[in-house]
Amino acid sequence: MSDRERASILIVDDSPENLTILGETLQPYYDVKAANSGERGMQIARRAPHPDLILLDLMMPGADGYEVFENLQADPATRSIPVIFVTGMNGVDAELRGLESGAVDYIVKPIVPQLLLARVRTQLELKTARERLLGQNAELEAEVVRRVAQNEMIQEVAIRALAHLAETRDPETGNHILRTQEYVRHIANGLKVLPHFAGILTENYIQMLVRSAPLHDIGKVGIPDHILLKPGPLSPAEWEVMKTHARLGRDAIDLAERDTSQPVDFLDLAKEIAHWHHERWDGTGYPDGLAGDSIPVSARIMALADVFDALISRRVYKEPLSYATSRQLIALGRERHFDPDVVDVFLDHFGDFCTIADRLREPEGELYGREAVCAQG
């Protein structure tokens, strides 16, 4: 109801005399509708446009005022319409029952016109105020949703920008960050049904994990070109330098986090992934030689996603392996390189990983095409 519209009031009373008195009092100021029974009153109330206020007699044959009010409250279309009980029943108990049932006011007959108009005006003003507040709340909620979405988009853009910065140093990785992001999502969703992962892999954790995944190799920006882009095998000394990208990535994210005014949860996961995704289940990985469950879940998931994509992709130092061969190598790494549960999810959903790889293949076709082994799951 806008300020320029006349409010509409529905009067429900079985007495023609009462309908006349109430109608004559209210009509100069409001649009008035009348019903001489509870049943008829409910029909009118449910018909759009709904009345802004209802004056409801309690003592009526058939559906009395309490029954009418209960029906109006049960209907989503009418439950927000304020109701003033109008009755000849005097006494505190009757008034308390009426107000406790949910009516906004209680007027005792005989009607005093000035008092009726004052109470009606008060309730209509309160209704307008509630509607304005609801409108403001809806606008605020919409703005909050917009701001959250905007912040998430900014985070995504910032993460992708940093990840692509690493790719400028290693251009042959191409869609690697997109593919590994999807592999991580599939592995995490497969693991969350297992009891020992259920407490960790919540929906929020998985969302942050997927968001963090593109930063796993951010430390490569600190590796010299002659090592990072070397087409042949690395010497032992060069390999030691290459391995430092794990710590470099962790340190870079840690420095970025220090500039924030409060902790950023997904950056904690990003640090875990960057730092430990080259650890191995048997403890032979780097940089810290962590083993088994001491390796964070995020890094265990990222480890398999990263290795599978490296196997099926062309690099300056290797040709891509087939999906079938890559699957076999991952399976051989169970309980050696990889968490056995992570491997089991990968093998159970292998066809999905092939689909992701095909969908996000490099424009130049650097990945091998789909093979029959993918369809076998």
Image (tube, grey):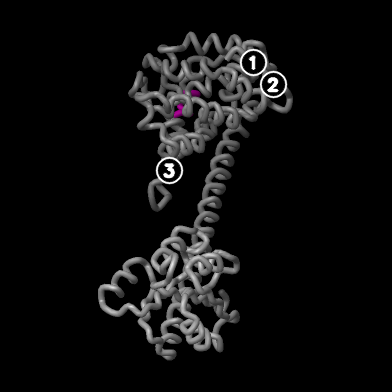
Q: Is residue 354 visible?
A: yes
Location of residue 325 in the rendering, given as x and y in whole percent from the top left corner: 59, 9
The secondary structure type at the circle numbered 2 is loop
Q: Is residue 222 visible?
A: no
Q: Which mark is residue 255?
A: 3
| Disc on the earlier residue, 2 or 1 | 1
Residue interval drawn in magenta: 242-246
The residues tagged by marks 3 and 1 sit, at their Cα atoms, a distance apart of 35 Å
For the point 43% across and 91% down, which residue is it? 114
Badge 3: residue crowd in 10 Å (few <14, some 14–19, many ≥20): few
**Disc 1: which residue:** 320
Eye-nearest disc, 3 or 1: 1
Of residue 355 and residue 99, the one placed in the foreground of this image is 99
Most common secondary structure along the magenta stretch: helix
Badge 2: residue crowd in 10 Å (few <14, some 14–19, many ≥20): some
The residues tagged by marks 2 and 1 sit, at their Cα atoms, a distance apart of 8 Å
Q: Which mark is residue 366?
A: 2
| Disc on the earlier residue, 2 or 3 | 3
Badge 1: residue crowd in 10 Å (few <14, some 14–19, many ≥20): some
- Quarter of the image where one finds residue 161: top right
The secondary structure type at the circle numbered 3 is helix
Location of residue 295 in the rendering, given as x and y in whole percent from the top left corner: 37, 24
Left or right: 79 as drawn, with respect to 360: left
Answer whether residue 244 is magenta in the image.
yes
Of residue 368 and residue 16, the one placed in the foreground of this image is 16
Exactly how many numbered labels are in the figure? Answer: 3
Judged from this view, the residue extending furthest toward the right is 364
